[in-house]
Amino acid sequence: MKSSFTKKLWLIFAQSVTACLGLLFVLRLFFPNLLVDLLNANTANPIEAVTIKQAEPTPAPNVAGSYSIAVKKAMPAVVNIFTSKKVVENPHQDFLDDPMFRHFFGDQLDDPDSQAQPENSLGSGVIVSEQGLILTNNHVVATADEIEIALSDGRKMSAKVVGTDPETDLALIKIEAENLPAITFASSDKLNVGDVVLAIGNPFGVGQTVTQGIVSALGRNHLGINTFENFIQTDASINPGNSGGALVDTEGNLVGINSAIYSRSGGSMGIGFAIPATLARQVMDQIVAGGDVTRGWIGIEAQDLSPELVESFKLPSTNGALVAGVIPDSPASKAGLHAGDVLLSIEGQLITDTASMLNIIAALPPNKNATVKIFRDEAEKSVVVMIGKRPKPKVENNE
């Protein structure tokens, strides 16, 4: 009797345990967090939900302080230029090539060390038309026997010179390609000191590079770099290999052609010079139209006015250029100008110094009369000069 009662108790216990386990299994299956919540409700420090802040990706366009839009617009139009020139290292090569000596010595004169070796250099350029015209510095391609262009998409092709203008250090070259990404010109006349600019080029041959700075000064001249100087000065880093590259504004439009740096070490020291895009466009258009650049010329040698000269000539101001000499049979000579005259203005444009005089006269069309206001014998006079064409074999600082 007792044994039967014990078996019934164990049977009830086993069934109860089985039912509880089944209930727990169902609750666990359909309410997985129920037990955790029940535990947390009876805990002194319940587990709270943790919120993680994930920063949303910021779109590239219109990001304050970023110039990525300008760079994406301008960079495809900037190319790398690689030039090579064959040079003869043996100074006696011409003597050794003499037929008489070759008759006696023959191939013994062929020294491998005296053979022509390539001399390589690099620079940058700017695509200015979809048909393959590229603007660069004249000194980048002036002595090159071969010119190779590397486009931003990786393509490489040879180029030929269309025309050059050594007096502004500009050159126009061409590659045989179509539908190229051409730069958009901006008016460099609207630049102001303090404007942000970007320099794009191939410094030291490391590859296409962008540097950022501001316009430090405008109208820089008397640097002795070119005959006609009207440079944009910038502190954007410009290094060897940047020559001929683009100086662009924050919209990605061309404002200048990077040309030179001031440096004692060969690297950037925060003083770089660029040829204004307006001047580059004028030179380019003339080369495209006629193959070269035509400038006005009157044939004088001039010098800047010092305070001592101003006092000696009793001039009203320091503006002007002193005629130091007149080339015989030149337009100035035929018009009656002579040494000692001071040029004050040409066609109503004020002359501040010899640099401004050069630029004003150069912009005048040849074979047309121009009115020149001069100071002579303590009085102002007007003289009419027939503008001539500036000769190619130039004389430094002559006009």
Image (cartoon, helix red, strand yellow):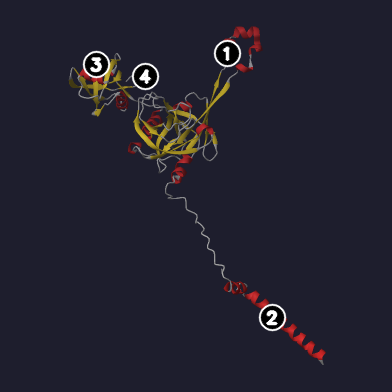
Residue 261 coordinates in the image, percent (x, y): 43, 29
Compare marks 1 and 3 and give the one earlier in the sequence.
1
| Residue type, numbered disc 4 | Glu
Determine the CA span between mark 4 and mark 3: 20 Å
Viewport quadrant of the C terminus: top left
Residue 174, labelled with which disc?
Answer: none
The tag on residue 396 is: 4
Q: Tell me if 64 is positioned left or right of 41 in this view.
A: left
Q: Please tell me which of labels 2 and 3 falls first in the chain.
A: 2
Labels 2 and 4 touching (C-beta < 8 A): no
Mark toward the start of the polypeptide (2 vs 4) = 2
Q: Dot 3 lies on which element?
A: loop
Which of labels 1 and 3 is toward the front? 3
Please name the amino acid that badge 3 sits on: Gly
Mark 2 or 4, which is nearer the eye? 2
Q: Is mark 2 on a helix, strand or loop?
A: helix
Q: Would you call the spot at circle 3 few (<14 residues within 10 Å), some (14-19), or many (20 or more)?
A: some
Check residue 340 in the rendering and tell me which mark sits there, or answer none: 3
Q: Is residue 64 in sight in this rendering? A: yes
Q: Which amino acid does label 2 sit on?
A: Cys
Q: Do the residues labelled 1 and 3 touch (CB within 8 Å)?
A: no
Image vertical order of residue 162 relative to residue 197, above or below: above
Q: Which residue does the numbered mark 1 point to in the structure image?
A: 93
Q: Residues within 10 Å of mark 2 (few under 14, many from 20)?
A: few
